[in-house]
Amino acid sequence: MQHPVTEELIAQSQRYLDECLGRVGRCLDEITEEEVWKRPNANSNSMGNLVIHLQGNITQYIISSLGGAPDLRERDAEFAATEGADKATLWAGIQQVVAEAKEVIGRMTPEQMMERRSVQGFDYTGVANVVHVVEHFSYHVGQMVFWVKLLKDKDLAFYGGIDLNAKNE
């Protein structure tokens, strides 16, 4: 039996990974194939770069570090790419990585959540790996949303129909 805090961490992490994934899909739907690899400027990344970067990060921190798969990541290549996969391929890739990460997270025990690991030279617990991935995913999704809004001058209405002015009870 899981500890309630571990169960909640797992459930909320999986929920936020799904939420971020849905926003990536929405952003990809809004842009053209030509815009996938367009960069706002030389010091910024394209949607394509961000999607492959997220795949690399989630794979390294969750699937490899927590799940035991080999760490084959080539991080610099994620940002160096100026062309590559089309929207459908990027979408399929990020969906597969998120599904696998959610599975790995779902199998974690309280002991595994507290076990320390070295990732990218940092010393993290399993909890820290999970929190890092959720936070990192959300951060880059925010960049994608901003870029799509800038390109399309469009509200993506992620909270459409929800009263965000409701007060706490």
Image: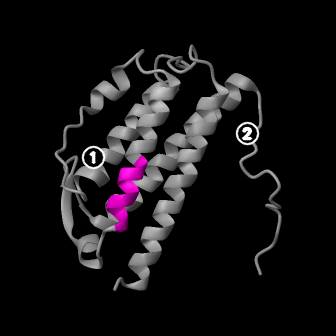
Report the disc number at residue 32. none
SS state under label 1 = helix
The one nearer the camera, 77 or 25, is 25
Residue at coordinates 29% horizontally, 75% vertically from top-left?
Answer: 109
Q: Which residues are magenta?
A: 98-106
SS state under label 2 = loop
Q: Quadrant of the N terminus?
A: bottom left
Which picture quadrant has residue 75?
top left
Residue topped by disc 1 = 60
Q: Position of residue 106 (x, y in %)?
A: 37, 66
In this image, 115 relative to 129: left or right? left
Q: Amino acid at mark 1?
A: Gln
Residue topped by disc 2 = 156
Q: Position of residue 112 (x, y in %)?
A: 24, 71
In this image, 144 relative to 154: left or right? left
In the picture shown, does residue 40 fall above or below 54? above
Residue at coordinates 83% horizontally, 61% vertically from top-left?
Answer: 163
Q: Amino acid at mark 2?
A: Leu
Q: Residues within 10 Å of mark 1 (few under 14, many from 20)?
A: many
Query: Is 105 one of the magenta-colored residues?
Result: yes
